[in-house]
Amino acid sequence: MALYELENIQHHYKGTPVLSIDRLRIAENSVTGLCGPNGSGKTTLLSLLGLIAPPAAGAIYFRGHRARPYDGRIRDKVALLPQQSFLLKRSVYQNVAYGLRIRKNTDNESGRVAHALSLVGLNPEKFTGRPWYALSGGEARRVAMAARLALRPEVLLLDEPTTSVDAASAQLMREAAAEAHLQWGTSLIIASHDMQWLQGICYDLVYLFSGTILGKGKKTIVFGPWEHTSGGGAMRTLADGQVLMAENAPRDLTGAAAILDPDDMSLHASPDDAGAKKRPLKGRIVCLDLEQHTDLIRVLVFAGRSEFCLYLDAQTLSARGWQPGTELWLAYRPDRVQWKAHGLQ
Ligand SMILES: Nc1ncnc2c1ncn2[C@@H]1O[C@H](COP(=O)(O)OP(=O)(O)OP(=O)(O)O)[C@@H](O)[C@H]1O
């Protein structure tokens, strides 16, 4: 059974449409990333999933049951870390324990507060008595995270948890989220611009663009400007002058994006190895990451100063001797490119 199912969701602010989702399924015990540019609807979607706001239209199902806004039974299982860390004007201890008390979940309160603080790298002895005003921005963000972790929620919704904190705090936030998933099986839904993190930790990615879902899964999305070619295709001149070709282009290319599936791309030492159906782009490996839940290596390739993402197994990678910095050819299938027309606005 799905954790969440959304059907025909529409949402607007003061009459302006900001979200339109026909269907979205989020699996149980999974880690889902929400990505997309500023204003694409990530925070709005998280607030609907957290049952903090009702959608203007459509239905949200939580584990098969229609979820009503503010439903206490579901909200006890779900915790949302908003973009701003709103702390109570009290001590760190009071802040972290607050949610436990509201939920009348006070067994071993001090132990749970201390454990949650240590998960985000804050020494409980040093921090529990600190007042809210004696915290740096990064510490305040980690206290807000600890307050959610103390609840051991079944679902943790994180809105840009690593922005406006330094690199060390961001790493602690990432580790704490991973710990919650591994220790308690907490399902994570994370809105973030940190694509490297999302690509590494997420089982699934949802790409939002102007209020609509542009694609799902581990896709490479190429925004325009696209130009029509003869024969119904389109081309995109990349920053270094190389050209990306795509077939079956929509008639209106304004705001359109092309979506490339990792299965339709491959890497080669020579352009001649690409095969008849594929076109090659010259590129360079910029990053290799282990994808934790599949044991595959995510290969990030820069071609034409655009990012393309593929997956290889470790054996193939080491047999070819490819590593960050290796120059190679990325081959893609113009006939398999999917298109997404422009979003709501
Ligand atoms: N309270 C509000 N009143 C009016 N418009 C809003 C409100 N909150 C958000 N919006 C608008 O809704 C759209 C979606 O905003 P949202 O915050 O969900 O996007 P986002 O993808 O989370 O953006 P960011 O990456 O900048 O956090 C934007 O156009 C935004 O201006």
Image: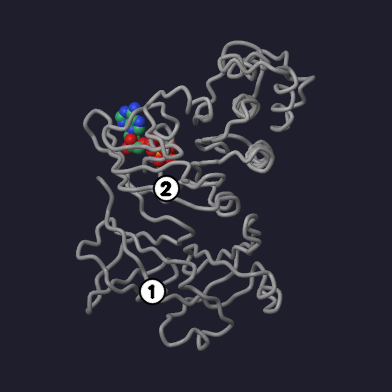
Give the image quarter of residue 19: top left
Packing grade of label 2 (10 A; few <14, some 14-19, many >=20) is: some
**The one of 227 and 203 positioned closer to us in this rendering:** 203
**How far from the left and from the top, in percent, is residue 236?**
34, 68
Q: What kind of element bears circle 1?
A: strand
At horizontal 41% and vertical 51% (from top left) the residue drawn is: 207
Front-most of residues 249 and 136: 249
Image height of 296 relative to 114, above or below: below
Instruction: Give the quarter of the figure containing the C terminus.
Output: top left
217 or 72: nearer the viewer: 72
Within the image, what quadrant is residue 178 found in?
Answer: top right
Residue at 52% across / 38% down in the picture? 160
What secondary structure is found at the residue carrying circle 2?
strand
Q: Which residue in the protein does label 2 denote? A: 25
In the rendered view, would you say 119 is above or below 23?
A: above
Q: Position of residue 90 (x, y in %)?
A: 62, 11
Q: Residue furthest right?
A: 125
In this picture, residue 179 sits left or right of residue 77: right
7 vs 308, left or right, is left
Where residue 115 appears, as percent x and y from the top left, is: 73, 27
Residue 239, x across and y down, in percent = 43, 66
Q: Quadrant of ligand 1?
A: top left
Circle 1 residues within 10 Å: few <14, some 14–19, many ≥20: some
Task: Report the Cα–Cα distance between label 1 and label 2.
Answer: 35 Å
Check residue 243 in the rendering and tell me which mark sits there, or answer none.
1
Q: Identify the residue at horizontal 66%, vertical 36% (top origin).
A: 169
Q: Nearer the viewer, residue 240 or 326?
A: 326
Of tags 1 and 2, the one toward the viewer is: 2
